[in-house]
Amino acid sequence: MPLFAIVVRPSPGIRRFYQRLLVNWGAMVAFLYKHGLVILIALLVFTADQFSKLGIEFYLPMYSSWPEEGFFRFTHVANTGSAFGLFGGNNMPLTIASIIGIVVLVLFYRAQGTPGVWVQTSLGLMFAGAFGNLADRIRLGHVTDFIDVGPWYIFNLADASIVTGIIIFGAVLLLTRPAPRPTLVTTSTPGDEEYAD
């Protein structure tokens, strides 16, 4: 068969390949259109959280601060508890709780249909925080905390991401008006009325 015929008239196998490719490409575009913001926020915040923790672990010895004094410092601590140091010494139960929390978030997100921008933002932040601290628990057996602000608990970007996501989600619930319920309109035709004697 001439090369020209191969180029002009592709074989059925090649046609099927390109048809599947177009279908898969369309499905991928639709997936990114629906979930892209959640994925983007989760990836960006998760990456920032992990790199910031690796930097602290590499450059700042455990339980030391930089600067040594001041309202805002970086203080390297190992947190075996939950966010902001609560429930210390319970790494394994909290690891299981983190996995359950992520599963619940996934199920909740799947039930949303097509959530709005702010709901996607809040869920992306919560996913990033949950995965960030879970990665620490699996990798180290504890969570690396380092943001030390005044008398507050020492925390990390994942903690801040979870709290910010919860605040945004709560604000959406409080400030978003529910869609008006449809009203039933009834019409009467002449002769249907009842007349009193």
Image (cartoon, helix red, strand yellow):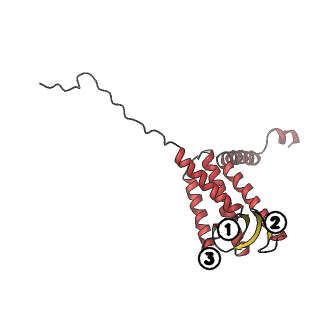
Residue at 65% from the left image edge and 70% from the top image edge: 85
How far apart are labels 2 and 1 at the CA level?
A: 28 Å
Residue 31: image location, x then y, percent: 66, 48
Q: How crowded is mark 1: few (under 14 residues within 10 Å), some or many (20 or more)?
A: many
Residue at 82% from the left image edge and 38% from the top image edge: 8
Specify the quadrant that holds the C terminus: top left
Residue beneath label 2, please? 67
Amino acid at the residue labelled 3 = Asn
Labels 2, 1: front one: 2
Residue placed most toward the observer, 110 or 136? 136
SS class, disc 3:
loop
Q: How crowded is mark 3: few (under 14 residues within 10 Å), some or many (20 or more)?
A: some
Residue 168: image location, x then y, percent: 61, 51
Residue 68: image location, x then y, percent: 80, 68
Q: Which residue lies furthest to the bottom in this view?
A: 89
Residue 85 got which mark?
none
Circle 3/circle 2 CB separation < 8 Å: no
Residue beneath label 1, please? 134
Residue placed most toward the observer, 98 or 147? 147
Residue at 82% from the left image edge and 70% from the top image edge: 60
Q: Of the residues under marks 3 and 2, which one precedes in the sequence?
A: 2
Residue beneath label 3, please? 90
Q: Residue furthest front?
A: 70
Q: How crowded is mark 2: few (under 14 residues within 10 Å), some or many (20 or more)?
A: few
Amino acid at the residue labelled 1 = Leu
Amino acid at the residue labelled 2 = Pro
Specify the quadrant that holds the N terminus: top right
